[in-house]
Image (cartoon, rainbow, N blue to C red):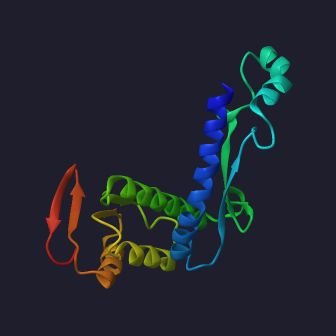
């Protein structure tokens, strides 16, 4: 188990290191550069070999009848200004970070597939102030993104924001599982 555990640990650490600049770039664009974010990878294997870790916790693991340490206990800590975002970030900051993570995932998928995947921004405007929403929409209106679907319950807000950014759009109303294209204004 030591060799696979080391490989998992190394791959996760490298992944966190490679994701940080991508997530930071997207978060900065969404937030307008208001806060700095970080990604920390925490593992029981940091500073310890797998064999030593297992030996140190063997009696406890036997008593509990499960393994209490190892790569299955690893975690990613998302931070803002050095503090855990889940404790110090507002709902809007947390959602902005989540969207930045999703955009980083989108970028990875785009590189792996060779073409942009479809992007669904569901209930995007909830918990985000208008500045962040405007920054986000301006970003996705660029040529780096392919087809985008945005859902919102406030048709006036959606129309006002999207129409400012692009004329290359179509609006649909969803009702009882049926989608109807809307010509002109919502």
**Residue in view at x 55 percent, y 69 percent:** 27
Q: How many marks?
A: 0
Instruction: Determine which quarter of the picture holds residue 34.
Output: bottom right
Q: Position of residue 96 (x, y in %)?
A: 54, 66
From the viewer's perspective, is 161 left or right of 70?
left
From this view, report whether residue 23 is shown above or below residue 68: below
**Residue in view at x 27 percent, y 64 percent:** 147
From the viewer's perspective, is 75 left or right of 116?
right
From the viewer's perspective, is 175 left or right of 80?
left
**Residue in view at x 66 percent, y 71 percent:** 36
Q: Nearer the viewer, residue 88 or 25?
A: 25
Q: Position of residue 149 (x, y in %)?
A: 30, 62
Q: Nearer the viewer, residue 174 or 104?
A: 104
- The C terminus appears in which quarter of the rendering? bottom left
Q: Position of residue 179 (x, y in %)?
A: 18, 56
Q: In the displayed image of the protein, which residue is found farthest to the front?
A: 3
From the viewer's perspective, is 85 left or right of 137?
right
- The N terminus appears in which quarter of the rendering? top right
Instruction: Determine which quarter of the picture holds residue 136.
Output: bottom left
Instruction: Determine which quarter of the picture holds residue 84.
Output: bottom right
Q: Position of residue 89 (x, y in %)?
A: 66, 64
Q: Nearer the viewer, residue 95 or 39?
A: 39
**Residue in view at x 30 percent, y 76 percent:** 159
């Amino acid at each position: 188990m030591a060799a696979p555990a080391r490989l998992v640990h190394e791959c996760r650490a490298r992944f966190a290191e490679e994701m940080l600049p991508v997530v930071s770039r997207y978060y900065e664009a969404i937030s307008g550069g208001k806060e700095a974010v970080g990604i920390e990878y925490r593992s029981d294997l940091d500073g310890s070999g797998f064999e030593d870790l297992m030996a140190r916790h063997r009696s406890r693991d036997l008593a509990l009848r499960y393994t209490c340490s190892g790569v299955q206990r690893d975690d990613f800590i998302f931070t803002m200004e050095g503090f855990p975002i889940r404790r110090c970030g507002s709902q809007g900051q947390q959602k902005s970070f989540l969207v930045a993570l999703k955009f980083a995932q989108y970028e990875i998928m785009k590189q792996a597939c060779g073409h942009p995947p479809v992007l669904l921004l569901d209930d995007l405007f909830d918990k985000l102030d208008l500045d962040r929403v405007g920054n986000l929409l301006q970003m996705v209106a660029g040529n780096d993104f392919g087809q985008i679907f945005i859902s919102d319950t406030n048709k006036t807000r959606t129309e006002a924001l999207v129409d400012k950014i692009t004329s290359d759009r179509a609006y649909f109303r969803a009702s009882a599982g049926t989608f109807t294209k809307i010509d002109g204004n919502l």
